[in-house]
Image (cartoon, grey):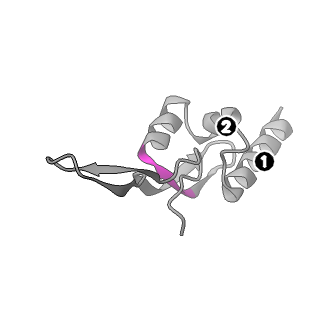
Amino acid sequence: MSRRCELTGKGPMSGNNVSHANNKTKRRFLPNLNDVTLQSEVLGRGIKFRISAAALRTVDHRGGLDGFMAKAKVDELSDSALKVKKEIAKALAAAA
């Protein structure tokens, strides 16, 4: 399982550990990933994602999964999230 957020595409970054003596060794900064089930009001069901804590706050800020997917960029979403985005768009079009 990759260490990448399914909604924002955030992944591991690299940097340095810096000691008191200013010695530098390479290290990785891993994203804070959580397994969550987000509820879609349009689809009427929950969808499981592995997303970062920052993405979870963004989903809440945009009014839930449906609002987030409406504004989400296609190139940042994983394959499963892209499938959900298309399902939500189709359900919204059918309802309108």
Q: Which residue is mark 1?
A: 86
In the picture provided, is 77 more to the left or to the right than 91?
left
Q: Position of residue 58 (x, y in %)?
A: 50, 35
Residue type, numbered disc 2? Ala
Q: Position of residue 20 (x, y in %)?
A: 14, 47
The residue shown at (49%, 30%) is: 61
Q: In terms of depth relative to the viewer, which is nearer, 56 or 1?
A: 1
**The C terminus, quarter of image:** top right
In the picture provided, is 86 more to the left or to the right than 56?
right
Q: Which residues are magenta?
A: 48-53
Q: Secondary structure at mark 1?
A: helix
Residue neighbourhood size for the residue with mark 2, other residues' Cα within 10 Å, grouped as few (<14), some (14–19), many (≥20) = some
Considering only order in the chain, which callout, 1 or 2, is on the residue closer to the N terminus? 2
In the displayed image of the protein, which residue is found farthest to the bottom?
1
Q: Position of residue 74 (x, y in %)?
A: 73, 43
The residue shown at (23%, 51%) is: 23
**The N terminus, quarter of image:** bottom right
Q: Which residue is mark 2?
A: 72
